[in-house]
Amino acid sequence: MAEELSQVNLSGRQIRALAHPLRLRLLGELRMHGPATATQLAVGLATNTGATSYHLRQLAEVGLVLDIARPGGGRQRWWRAAHDMSSWRRSYYEGDPDATAAAEWLERHQVSRFAELAQAWRQAIPGEPAEWRDAGEISDYLLTLDVARVGSLLADLEVVIERYRAEAADDPRPGSRAISLYLAALPRVGPHGPVAGEGAAAGDAAEDGAREDT
């Protein structure tokens, strides 16, 4: 049976340490591919061992990565991620401007990373099998909800996502591949934001008139 994912609610100290391009990539590599040495990570990320060693120590100081003993590892230091997932909210860091700035940096990085992955997929589509061309999609919906329903919607979706993750871990199927699934609930702001009672009903197409199938 698949193990439950471990999650850390980032403290102010942790999010300040994580808001750095190389540290974020190092933690991502360890979470995705498992334990590694600084040398292995340097090769995979096209940087140098001195940089990876330094930034791994910075992550270890705040408890995001662990220095582990590995049988047959000799004198090499092996590192692993301390958690499977990170979580944060702006409200965690009220009164801490540096941690708030770090949260803003991570959120901007998330948006940029999504755009990079989406563009990379669109460029790769011509060479992909037909079934994956149809499976890889981007959808957007417009709903009018109160705060409580937004929270409930996201919680329900997280349950569904976790069910699929656990099923795939327990029963891997041929042809499986890593996918990036982004989940966002972004209130509309500015002059075009909907008012109460307007907007599409749950499940209706978004404002551009259709779901986009890539």
Image: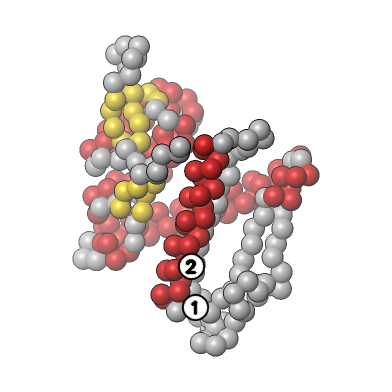
Q: Categorize mark 2 by other alpha carbons within 10 Å: few (<14), some (14-19), many (20+).
A: few
- What percent of the width, then of the height, locates residue 158? 47, 57
Q: Categorize mark 1 by other alpha carbons within 10 Å: few (<14), some (14-19), many (20+).
A: some
Is the residue under label 2 in contact with that under label 1 (CB below 8 Å)?
A: yes
- What percent of the width, then of the height, locates residue 32? 47, 36
Q: Is residue 89 visible?
A: yes
Q: What element carries label 1?
A: loop
The amino acid type, in three-letter code, at marker 2 is Leu
Pick whichever, 24 or 214, lies toward us: 214
Up the image or down, 157 lies above or below 20; here it is below
Task: Say how many tags the image has.
Answer: 2
Q: Distance between the residues labelled 1 and 2?
A: 10 Å
Pick whichever, 136 or 28, lies toward us: 136
- What percent of the width, then of the height, locates residue 137? 67, 55
Query: Would you name the residue on which mark 1 appears?
Result: 145
Query: Would you name the residue on which mark 2 appears?
Result: 153
Up the image or down, 18 lies above or below 42; here it is below
Mark toward the start of the polypeptide (1 vs 2): 1
Q: Residue 111 carries which label?
A: none
Residue 64 relative to residue 181: left or right = left
Residue 155 relative to residue 55: left or right = right
Indicate the quadrant containing the C terminus: top left, top right, bottom left or bottom right. bottom right
What residue is at 30 percent from the left and 40 percent from the top? 64
The amino acid type, in three-letter code, at marker 1 is Leu
Q: What element carries label 2?
A: helix
Indicate the quadrant containing the N terminus: top left, top right, bottom left or bottom right. top left
What residue is at 21 percent from the left and 66 percent from the top? 95
